[in-house]
Image (cartoon, helix red, strand yellow):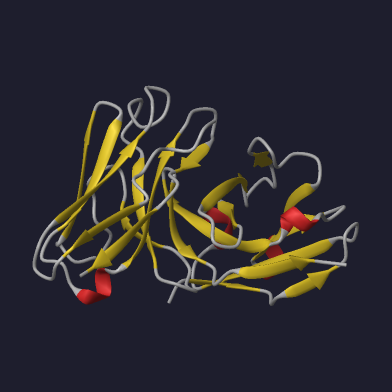
Amino acid sequence: QSALTQPPSASGSPGQSVTISCTGTSSDVGGDNYVSWYQQHPGKAPKVMIYEVSKRPSGVPDRFSGSKSGNTASLTVSGLQAEDEADYYCSSYAGGSNVVFGGGTKLTVL
Amino acid sequence: QVQLVQSGSELKKPGASVKISCKASEYTFRNYAINWVRQAPGQGLEWMGWINTHTGDATYAQGFTGRFVFSVDTSVSTAYLQINSLKAEDTAVYYCAREKGAYWFDPWGQGSLVTVSS
């Protein structure tokens, strides 16, 4: 299966909102509600921010939200903070017990 | 707290094998699958597959069949990734991750860097 499509970069000023998209197909993103988002700071392991499209694990700020429309999922970070600067990856169930990741988006806080 | 601790960095020659460990703590190991994810230098995350820690059955993603082997030892709550016939392009950080819920991963191990060079 092919990687999900994410924009390579996104940016915003502190306090602003930014949305990162993740486009797949009806066989992955559009097929079920098993989309998750991960934050990765340089040299660190990824950390889950959103699962099942829009659910937030305990401890993740409510500034992070997720949604989906058709074959495209989105992660919105509201009230941007300096510590939000990181790489963000989406992932989706892709059928047959398989998972596929997006190519990643580098979020810069200006 | 729930955590996965991986083995350290490895430097291997082409053609050799490497076995990475991923030790779980503070939860019942057999209740959650372990997934493996590769990240080549400067690249994104690539899902390698997963292992059922209860049965030992493994599923491999396309591109990770043949040379890659997942295993578990439930007596020590540890999952393993073995890579045989190493190639330069296997140079990457390898992460293990617990499948907390359907197709999402938490926590992740800290990563194990494998460098393949002659």
Taking the spot 34% from the left edge, 46% from the top edge, the residue there is A7
Exactly how many numbered labels are in the figure? 0
Please state if B72 lies on the left or on the right of B111 as rendered: right
Is B27 left or right of A73, judged from the image as shown? right
Residue B96 at least partly seen: yes
Q: Quadrant of the N terminus of chain B?
A: bottom left
Query: Residue A64's spot in the image, x, y percent?
Result: 19, 58
The quarter of the picture where the C terminus of chain B appears is bottom right
Residue A46's place in the image compared with B5, above or below, is above
The quarter of the picture where residue B82 lies is bottom right
Q: Is residue A15 above or below residue A37?
A: below
Give percent across and percent down for residue A56: 24, 56
Along the viewing direction, whichever of B28 and A89 lies nearer the viewer: A89
Measured as percent of width and height from the top left, residue B22 is found at: 64, 67
Q: Residue at x 18, y 72 (%)?
A: A81
Residue at 84% from the left image edge and 68% from the top image edge: B12
Q: Looking at the rendering, which quadrant does residue A57 occupy?
A: bottom left
Q: Residue A80 sits in which quadrant? A: bottom left
Q: Looking at the picture, how far across and down is residue A67, in whole percent?
A: 20, 41
- When the figure is inspected, residue B108 is found, relative to residue B83, above or below; the finding is below
* Left or right relative to B69: residue B106: left
